Image (tube, grey):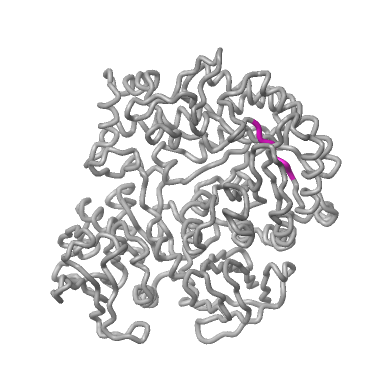
Amino acid sequence: MDKQTMENQSAGKQIYEYMLRYGMEPGLNEQERLANLLAFCRQAKISDVMFFYNCEELNRGHYTPEELDSWLDLIARMKPVLAAEGITASINPWSTLLHTDRGRKLRPGQDFTLMVDPQGRQATAVACPACDRFLEYLAWQYRTCAEKVQPNVLWVEDDFRLHNHHPLEWGGCFCDRHMAMYSALAGKKLNREEFVAGVLAPGSVHPYRKIWLDVALQTMLQVARTIRDAVMAVSPQTRLGLMTSDPAVHCAEGRDWPAIFTAFKTEKDPFIRIHLPCYTECTSQDYGVNFARVSRQVRHLTPDWVHNYGELENFPFSRLSTSLRFSQMQLETNALLDSKGITLDIFDMMGNGVLFSEGYQDILAESKPFLDTLVGLGFDNRCQAGVQVMIDPRSAFHLHTDAVQSMNELYNHERNLLNILIPFGIASCYNSGHDLRGQVLAIAGQYLRNLSSDEIRRLFADNFVILDGEAVLTLTELGLGELAGIAGTELVPMDNGINAFEQVMDGAAYCGITQARLTLQAGAGDYVKVDYSPRAPLHAYTHAISPFGADNGPAMTLVDGHIFILPYVHYGTGILSPFRRAILLDALTRADHFCRPVWTNAPHTSVIRYDQPGRTLLALVNFSGDEWQQVTLTFPDGIPVWQCAVLYTRENPDGMPAPLSVCGNDLQIGRDLPRIQMMVLELA
């Protein structure tokens, strides 16, 4: 640990921890690898080294006692060497159940039940998490790690899941043991085909769905308790950490986030490693959307007492897959999740160790002062303000499936309006409550199936509601279409010749263009044709138009001044239009009886607002490919009053007086915001 970090710790200042995931094979040039590791840790300001074992290319399936001992002996020898530098040692077993077979098989004496997928295919090495013999093995493994090394954190990999165990289709488990459990709860002997068909039955939810989700949760809770109890028996001070994936996928296996983390709690509260949604560099625009869809949602679902560390990975581990600047953007935006630090998976796991030529040490050192400041600011995700994106982690219990017969049908679509809100620069946050008043709500997918009719009526009566097409269909299927003035609906597939574009019909000019047109083809998604009640008070911004000029009725529509219809399903980037943005902002501007969000003037520039006691924090991230000069924030409900305004950037980590100017409800920041960088404005 570097001198400045140690001084900050001694002074009681919070520091942002870098936790390096590191593959170092026993007996392979150990002295060279150790020397490089120590040098890198000093230069990059690393706080903790997470030692892999049984990792990726070196994975042999499930380790034998002799194999595990050789790795733990190495880690035990490294621990005091690191401690002399002020660096802790953690252990990251690369597999729990096993991510994937990759041709590996069970070893002699490993008589584990293997995972079976919905089609009856059996894995060759991925274990069934309900197998008693495997649970005994897992307990031995974690108990041995805790006892021999007493690591700072003992991690559980993100193969702690039922989905995504290639080459199985989706995952499992539908082995004979699990089928017996399902049968016992169903009160009859079930075969696999019958049970899967019931779980995925279209229309009203079949009772087998609840059986699947309940057993899935209890199965994984038992794995968590097995690990926790094994560690507690020998090293109760050892902290456990869980790595996670996409919350929509976890929803399909019934995950109860508070229950899972309670099961992992030792004498210390557990860690979570939140997945940052890009292992290989993608467009920064896509990253901005998926950071909101995945990472911010996991943070919302995680109990406050769980310590959050994000995940930076650049597979296959070089600048050939991810640029330094992109990695630095991931590194810094992770702090917005109220993270205490980040895990760094930036070098391969085959035993090569540190590769200085890639330059990661430089960006880590450069960002460290800024990140120390950000963690000290104390972003509180409970205090976020903006459009309330409504989600329910138990939605798989209620959503209706199509006739596709795929486990993917259990993934919810409740966050889909973020595909629009984030590119449009509109502040948003997640909400899982039901008793909201005076807010702007984004309701997508089949979220409404999670609520009672009375709860739905209250939400619609007391809030400004933005609905996407799937939510409109759900509302009408629930027999509550009248809440949005809807008499009937029809789903119109994209690119079928019926609709070609929307045209503005309200007489206004948007973006300076009268009668503006917006595509309904090529990525705009399927379209929901809505027939409104003659008595419904409508402001129809646009109408759907055929290629031949026929008017197919209202498209984007404001109903009764507080229900805004975006009639699109499975929408992609084709929906992103400056005209749609202008129309949505006009509708929000009219919502003057509700708590409206702040928004930016720049495409793909996100603002996250935190209204914390005595101050407002505004994090701005430029996810676009453009450089922005003097970003403007629009506060339709008025700019927060401040006595002191401080701007924090990578170049000014300690803060500088914010160069602000005010024009009506617009707040202009007189500072450039380069592409894939962020700044934080504090108003106090």
Residue 570 location (% of width, % of height):
31, 56
Residue 21 location (% of width, % of height):
67, 42
Q: What's the residue at 49%, 62% (across, down)?
A: 283
Q: What's the residue at 46%, 69% (across, down)?
A: 426
Vertical placement of 135 versus 510: above or below?
Answer: above
Q: Is residue 378 magenta?
A: no
Residue 482 location (% of width, % of height):
20, 61
Quick check: 19 left or right of 438?
right
Instruction: Determine if residue 379 is in view.
Output: no
Vertical placement of 363 versus 618: above or below?
Answer: above
Q: What's the residue at 68%, 34% (across, down)?
A: 91
Most extreme residue toward the top, as rendered?
A: 109
- Which contiguous range is marked in magenta? 48-53
Vertical placement of 209 versus 447: above or below?
Answer: above
State the predominant SS element of the stretch in magenta: strand
Instruction: Determine if residue 284 is in view.
Output: yes
Q: Tag count in the figure?
A: 0
- Of residues 612 and 198, the one nearer the viewer is 198
Q: What's the residue at 77%, 30% (across, down)?
A: 76
Q: Quadrant of the C terminus?
A: bottom right
- Of residues 631 and 393, the one nearer the viewer is 631
Quick check: 369 left or right of 670?
right
Residue 392 location (% of width, % of height):
40, 48
Q: Quadrant of residue 476?
A: bottom left
Q: Is residue 52 magenta?
A: yes
